[in-house]
Amino acid sequence: MRNLIRTILLISLFFSVGQNLFGQGRLSGDLMTNVNFFQRDTNIKAAGNPLYDNFLSGGEVWLGLRYADANGFAAQVRFDGFQNSNLLNPSAAYTAAGIGMFNLSKDYKNFSISAGHIYDQIGSGILFRAYEDRGLLIDNALFGLKLQYQITNNLKIKGFTGQVRKQFERYQPVIKAINIEGGVPIGKNGYMTPGLGILNRTIDQASMDGVVATINSMEVDKRFIPKYNTNGVTLYNTLNTGNFTWYVEGAYKTEEAIFNTYNNRLENSNGNALFTTLGYAIERLGINGTLKRTDKFVQRTSPNETLLRGIYNWQPIVSPIRVQRVISRYSPQSQDVSELAASINTFFNPVKDLSVNINYTHINTLKDSFLTENSVNNQLEFTTVKLYRELYAEAEYRGVENWIFHLGAQYLEYNQAVYQVKDPNEYPLVTAITPFFEVVHIIDKTHSVRMEGQWMLNKEDYGSWLFALLEYNISPTWSFAVTDMFNYAPSGKNGDGLDPTHYPNVFVAYTKGPHRFTGQYVKQVEGVNCTGGVCRFEPAFSGFKIGITSTF
């Protein structure tokens, strides 16, 4: 408790001093609070851990304050608090509190300096990206120093160094990077923005000792001498000309010890990645294609870290993010060890009030990722493994006054064994077909009703699902929603496999200016939670959730 009080006093003192010293500035902030009440339900496997058996409640709070003045000085600080929280480990309680981040920065003419917790990225993020995602408890800010200089209107250079944040501590390896970006006009209607990024990571002695211990436990012919330093480089460019937009990025990193998730062992390898998108748009038509190839481009503070720990980059996603509840259960996360992914999306308006969107996504591993036995000569051979397929189509019609009609369907194939790290002999490829609809009726300027329905036909995993939603909105203040996710045809491979099960959700939200209050009763099936291509498995949830968000 004394540490908590001390933290709050430091925050107050920090900004009181700032306002006295720089009286012409502006102070702003934001608050986010989540509270969970855990209700034991053995039927959906929401039990068997301290949250449901002992603690019964928990939550998180983030309070951020920002100060900026007209002279280019800015300061930020954020208090993070966790009390029996299920965010760090959904099956265990996490309790801690303190200063989650702080940053001081100063701009002077074309030069800026920033110290503390830094959020930034190089290119698309393949080589380096420090960002925050509270839903997955990702906050890999770089704690250190950043310098940036705007050389000309079309050319800037920045450099930074520091250590990756780990809750209220830091991973010990050190990262140094430099990034140059420019802008070049091409003719009358063209423009390109090339960039170059170079990064070095130096591992610390304690982490190296862990790597060496693992290597020494391996078979003699698999051992290697690990390196303290790894270097990476990325080249990228965005080209806009006429109706075309083209982004391309290629990255390479030198040899280092990485953990190969496909064979569950350390290996010494370099890595490379290629990512590109090409878009074409004219009136009533837009086409966009995406291609990504990743070969052992693992960016972690050390190979001792797994899952979402120690990551200091972000792999761009190829598969579009789907908002439909049952479809989102099978969102494919980006693979940093081995992935060859492509997607093409077409959007068009054949008539004034009708829009159509069609997408196809195709994702495999590279050929040298999996060893399988050849049935002809009984020898082990490398093979390509299917990861994901999607054919998706939707149409929206607005030709009836005060009504919006949305209709679509998806076919998917999803490698549950790879994406959810399960035994492929017990968990085969998920194949599902999901038609869905959405209807919105605008009653008047402040009242509207929305209805959703989804039907997933699936024989793997939990089996087939029905989903229904009814939502009533009173703008801009109230929102009410009732949903039910019904496992009406269990497969017998997950859950109890015997009885159809309902997963209801009752939701209410109240908004007053910049303040929003939410409450809901939830029964949620276990599954994968994804945000922006980053995913993690979460167990079932049963109970109540209360949320508060505010800006001031």
Image: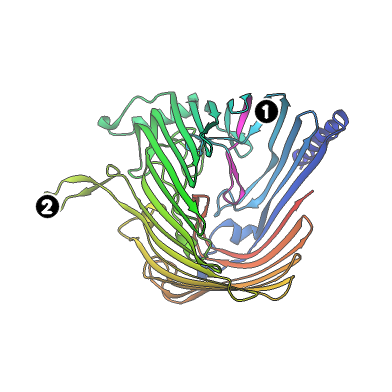
Name the residue beneath numbered marker 2. Answer: 376
Residue at 66 percent of width and 55 percent of height: 58
Name the spot of residue 500 as percent of width and height, x first: 46, 76
Name the spot of residue 217 as percent of width and height, x first: 34, 33
Classed neighbour count for the residue bearing mark 2: other residues with Cα under 10 Å, few (<14), some (14–19), many (≥20): few
Q: Is residue 209 left or right of residue 323?
A: left
Name the residue beneath numbered marker 1. Answer: 114
Residue at 58 percent of width and 71 percent of height: 398
Name the spot of residue 377 as percent of width and height, x first: 11, 49
Q: Is residue 174 left or right of residue 254?
A: right
Q: Does the magenta segment cover residue 453?
A: no
Residue at 49 percent of width and 27 percent of height: 199
Nearest to the eye among marks 1 and 2: give it.
Answer: 1
Bounds of the magenta segment: 131-149
Q: Is residue 240 visible?
A: yes
Three-letter amino acid code of the residue under disc 1: Ser
Which element type, helix, strand or loop, lies under badge 1?
A: strand
